[in-house]
Amino acid sequence: MAASFTPLQPTLGIAHGDLKLVCGYSAMEIHFMKLPTNSSCADVASRGSLELDTEKMKKNKGKVNTTTEKEFVFRFRAGRNVCVLKVPLQFPVQENVSDLHGRLMLLHKIPCFVENELKSTLSTFIESETIQDYDRGAELALQRLTTGEVDINQLTNTWAKAYSETTLEHARPEEPCWDEDFADVYHELIHSPASDTLLNLEHNYFVSVSELISERDMELNKLQERQAAEMDKVMQELGKTMTDQDVNAVASQHFDAQQVLENKWANELKQVTHIQKQEYQEWVIKLHQDMQNPNNSTINEEIKVQPSQLTVESEPGARLYEEQRQLEESFTIHLGAQLKTMHNLRLVRADVLDFCKHRRHGSSGTKLRRLQTALSLYSSSLCGLVLLVDNRVNSYSGIKRDFATVSKECTDFHFPRLEEQLEVVQQVVLYAWAQRSSKHKVQPEVPRNGTNTEDKIKNLERNPSNILPGEFYISRHSNLSEVHIVFHLCVDDNVRSGNITARDPAIMGLRNILKVCCTHDITTITIPLLLVHDMSEEMTIPWCLKRAELVFKCVKGFMMEMASWDGGISRTVQFLVPQSISEEMFYQLSNMLPQIFRVSSTLTLTSKR
């Protein structure tokens, strides 16, 4: 029995004890024939010989001068017989040597006892022949150069261009970025006598935007009151002269009117902040340029600010900063067994947005906080805040809407608006979801130790624009009172239960946030101690103590890991509890903290007479 179809007319047989296996490396053609032998080598031959078409690969078509065919010969002994494997290879070999070796072993059913020898011989053959091809190409190039076939000037120019483009010292410097230039200029000015002038200008812009927002709120309130009165009249006439369809039509008209008014004010506010940002940046650049001239007396007079200009008097009836007495407790701790690192801990009772709000009429500390935030804006001592949000990346409801409202009260002169940053985050979330989905389809996870993967499958089937509990996104700000970075940590309703553990997504999210702080020079971080921003009925005293103990211990462990992350830099961690918590509960938490962390003890020195 024999079947043959090949352009190469391959042969397979045994002559004088020698068996020849002939194959090419392309399309597969199989030949079977009966052989009068029962030796082990005959068993190899009876399995068939594979020949691969020697037509060139599609990607090598049209490159006749750059590819050559060479025959790889491998001999091995099977019993008393010597077997020979011949494989035509195209050089340069584009395939991986391990893949080619495995394919030869599988298709030819080569005995396993020669597997390593075949791979070693094949690798040596490909390496040596490739080097010979390179040597021949180099000799040919030198020959063309000596005979004058190649222009020496053109060759040297090509080499010089390639060297200058790939070598750093000869590369062209990158064009300066406007954001980087402005950051350097601002950092220099804010640490100069012009800092008071900058802060006053920022405060004036803040007052202007606040007045615009007040006008917007007043007009919206008037519209809502008028619509409420109209709806009351309609409801009184319901069933008499009005039907349900009439009520729905009036409600729709009210909604449309409210949307039109909100869009109008949103566009006006966006335009005002854009103009303020452009004017501010241009003024800062011009001020810096003028200050480079020491003989410019007008600039020196301009940046001089009288003390009366730095104080803002409270208007009658204005809301003061301290609506409710803020409770604070500070501690100094040491972590580490041998290499001890000192950290500062603070327990604070306040509203989470108090760290973001600017007070239009308040105490003199408002200016100091604004100055401190501005001084450290472009430094290695940034301040961060953890904000607990839901899984939707937007600013439409809840604490996210309140935070967005606060961020709009003052123009951000350094970073994009919050809406623009959230749009970028949404695109990244969609990309991450697509990558996870494709990875799961290509490499489905196998349950280990009896674990169930239903939760991960559900995560893949969720809304692709939402994030998972424990994940967080970051927004940058220069217009907030005491923070530069806000970590929007996603949590679910599970944080309100009393049975979360150290492996809960919210706790692991805190660990990842602290790791980001170590790698991005964030030395002050504010963390919600109870993992909630508001108290509810189920949050009893035992619930609060249990939750606080869990967070304290986990954060302590994460801070000890920081020593390996950043080399042991001193940091400040603020534990924030809700504003509505009682003083008794606050002091119980304050007494718990020294029991978990190693608080530095004071040393009193007395002199002996």
Image: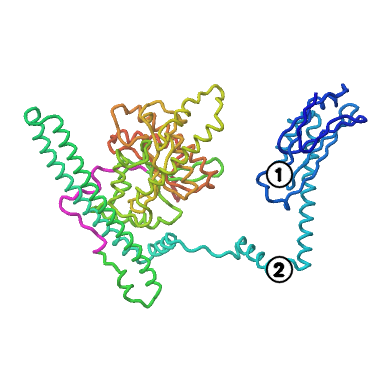
The quadrant where residue 323 appears: top left
Query: Where 240 sits versus 399, above or below?
Result: above
- For marks 1 and 2, the one nearer the N-term is 1
Disc on res. 151: 2
Left or right of 440 on screen, residue 425: left
Query: Where 144 sits versus 216, above or below?
Result: below
* Residue 150 image point, x, y percent: 72, 66
Which residue type does callout 1 highlight?
Answer: Lys
For the residue pair 187 and 268, the one nearer the viewer reads as 268
Q: Nearer the viewer, mark 1 or mark 2?
A: 1
Q: Are marks 1 and 2 in contact (CB under 8 Å)?
A: no
| Magenta: main secondary structure | loop
* Residue 407 image point, x, y percent: 31, 49
The quadrant where residue 555 appears: top left
* Residue 12 image point, x, y percent: 83, 31
Is residue 87 visible in the rendered image? The answer is yes
Answer whether residue 46 is magenta in the image.
no
Density class for disc 1 (Cα within 10 Å; few <14, some 14-19, many ≥20) is some
Q: Secondary structure at mark 1?
A: loop
Total labels: the figure holds 2
Left or right of 576 on screen, residue 91: right
Q: Secondary structure at mark 2?
A: loop
Quadrant holding the N terminus: top right
The residue range painted magenta reads 308-329
Residue bearing mark 1: 56
For the residue pair 106 and 10, the one nearer the viewer reads as 10
For the residue pair 598 and 539, the one nearer the viewer reads as 539
Q: Residue at the far bottom: name it.
A: 295
* Residue 246 image point, x, y percent: 13, 33
